[in-house]
Image (spheres, grey):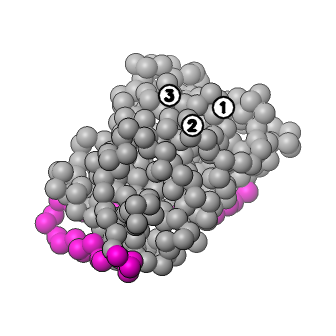
Amino acid sequence: MGTGVRDYRAADAERVAGLLGEVLPYFVTSAHGVQAQVAGAPARQRYRLLLAEAEDGRLLGCVRTGLFADASQEGAAFANLTVAPQARGRGVGGALLAAAERHLAAAGAASVYAWGADTPAVQAFAAHRGYRTGRAATYLRLDLGSGSPLPEPPVPTVPGGADLLPAARWAADPWPLYRADVESFRDEPGDVDYDGIGYADWRALTWDRPDFDPALSTVAVVGGEVAALVLVQTDGAGRYWSGGTGTRRAFRGMGLAKAAKAHSLHLARAAGCRTAYTGNDDGNAPMLAINLWLGYHPCGSERRYIRELVQPLHPFRSDGLGTAGVPGAAGHA
């Protein structure tokens, strides 16, 4: 198969969104979201979306790559592959990953974190290129359109109670939500510590992206303070993704995250969302328990594959297996 690797162009947005939706059914995206991720990426992220095409122009795969804009680890980078099923085993994944590694090395990356399926084929693909295995994540699905009942939001055990409000209330100044999000994610288990994002980058990667849904994103307020929040993305086609649920340290153990997420799902069903997706690091037992209580069921699993770029780059061989990766669900990659 003749394969060429090139940079994304705006005219590719629909095809890229279609590929991601086909390969990663739990990845809620749209053409607008793909374009915004490229056009609105913070400068420090050095983000690139690279595509692999056949000689006849068919899209065979893509890799989303850059430096983490939300991590304090110096030189931490990501390279997430997605390869069309019919193109696997033909060198597409290897060509894309090699191109991503060259870009990251030039950008000063020291280590690469890539999500991929936790299967023998992908493990062999990763090991052949010098990647070791990292932590695993589970993706979950909830049917919102079947009429099955959702649990009612529980009453948080907070003296004086708590208010559950849409994030849209902070449209004029989302700074309090940024602070709560950053504090919550500092304790999120994972291979990367998401503890280094500034306000401008947070806005670019979270608040200002076109698929962020401030009406369904829910904030728990206690005594006038933002205590917990659920950050939601939707694609306008009935799909809902809760990519960030967290509680500030002083307010944990009160049931705020559980109440906020249940409330958000009720709003999502009323707004016409038919399917909800979420993801958990397998070490995040409290959040997994909340999702199972809400009625989510596992629908996929992924694993992080990690490589130190201080080692010589592995020469690309065209006999590599193709692979599919997922976006960094726990962070803002």
Residue 312 in the figure: left or right of residue 13? right
Image spot of residue 125 (x, y percent): 66, 49
Q: Quadrant of residue 14?
A: top left
Amino acid type at circle 3 is Gly
N-term-proximal mark, 3 vs 2: 3
Task: Indicate the amino acid at tag 1.
Answer: Arg
Label 1 with label 3: CB-CB less than 8 Å: no
Residue 130 is labelled as none
Residues 163 and 287: in front is 163
* Mark 1 / mark 2, whichever is N-terminal: 1
Q: In the shown orientation, is residue 320 left or right of residue 110?
A: left
User: Label 1: which residue?
Assistant: 44
Q: Is residue 172 above or below residue 155?
A: above
Using residue 88 as the reference point, say whether residue 30 is left or right of it: left
Regarding residue 92, the answer to whether it shows in the image is no
Question: How dense is the environment of label 3, judged by Cα within 10 Å: few (below 14), some, or many (20 and up)?
Answer: some
| Residue beneath the point at 17% across and 51% down | 272
- Image depth: mark 1 or mark 2 in front: 2
Answer with left or right where residue 193 lies relative to residue 244: right
Q: Which residue is mark 3?
A: 40
Q: Nearer the viewer, mark 3 or mark 2?
A: 2
Quadrant containing the C terminus is: top right
Q: Is the residue 284 above or below the residue 311 in the image? A: below
The residue closer to the viewer here, 224 or 203, is: 224
Residue that sits furthest to the right in the current view: 311
Between 329 and 51, the residue placed more toward the observer is 329
Report the span colored magenta: 132-160
Label 2 sits on residue: 201
- What amino acid is at disc 2? Asp
Asked if the residue at tag 2 contacts the one at tag 3, i.e. Cβ–Cβ closer than 8 Å, the answer is no
